[in-house]
């Protein structure tokens, strides 16, 4: 089978895999090891914003589940909830990376980590 005959990747599978990979940054996200303080502040804010939204989504899912039948609730627990939880964990981990970097850079006077290290 040639690559043109290969089935296209399913967006739901790609999103679920991407959502669960904590080491995977967003497109155009710089390497934290060489990022400036301004970049660290920017990406910390981006991840904080996304994390706030994802936590609200998870809360809303749980609210909606409360009125579902046991069968529907179980299916949501097996499908939707794990994907959103993985995304929350990923965004929390990425936000933590940038938050730590902001604190380190503030202590070092704003120099990139690679430049600030002896």
Image (tube, rainbow, N blue to C red):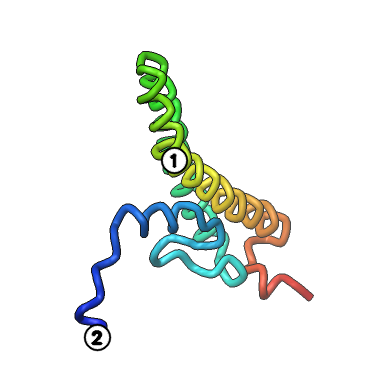
Q: Position of residue 45 (x, y in %)?
A: 48, 47
Q: Secondary structure at mark 1?
A: helix
Q: Closer to the camera, 31 or 61? A: 61
Q: Closer to the camera, 77 or 109? A: 77
Residue 2 image-quadrant placement = bottom left
Q: Is residue 65 above or below residue 113?
A: above
Horizontal side, residue 54 vs residue 104: left or right: left
Residue 78 image-quadrant placement = top left
- Which residue is most to the right? 118
Where does label 1 land, which residue? 84
Q: Are marks 2 and 1 in contact (CB under 8 Å)?
A: no
Q: Is residue 79 above or below residue 107?
A: above
For the point 36% across and 59% down, the residue is: 14
Where does label 2 land, which residue? 2
Q: Quadrant of the C terminus?
A: bottom right
Mark 1 Cα shell of 10 Å, populated few (<14), some (14-19), many (≥20): some
Q: Position of residue 79 (x, y in %)?
A: 40, 39
């Amino acid at each position: 089978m040639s690559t043109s005959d290969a089935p296209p990747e399913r967006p739901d599978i790609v999103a679920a895999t991407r959502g669960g990979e904590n080491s995977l940054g967003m497109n155009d996200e710089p390497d934290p090891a060489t990022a400036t303080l301004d970049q660290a502040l920017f990406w910390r804010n981006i991840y904080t914003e996304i994390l706030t939204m994802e936590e609200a989504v998870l809360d809303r899912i749980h609210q909606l589940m409360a009125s579902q039948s046991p069968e529907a609730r179980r299916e949501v627990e097996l499908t939707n909830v794990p994907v959103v939880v993985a995304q929350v964990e990923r965004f929390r981990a990425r936000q933590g990376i940038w938050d730590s970097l902001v604190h380190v850079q503030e202590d070092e006077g704003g120099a990139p980590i690679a430049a600030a290290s002896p």
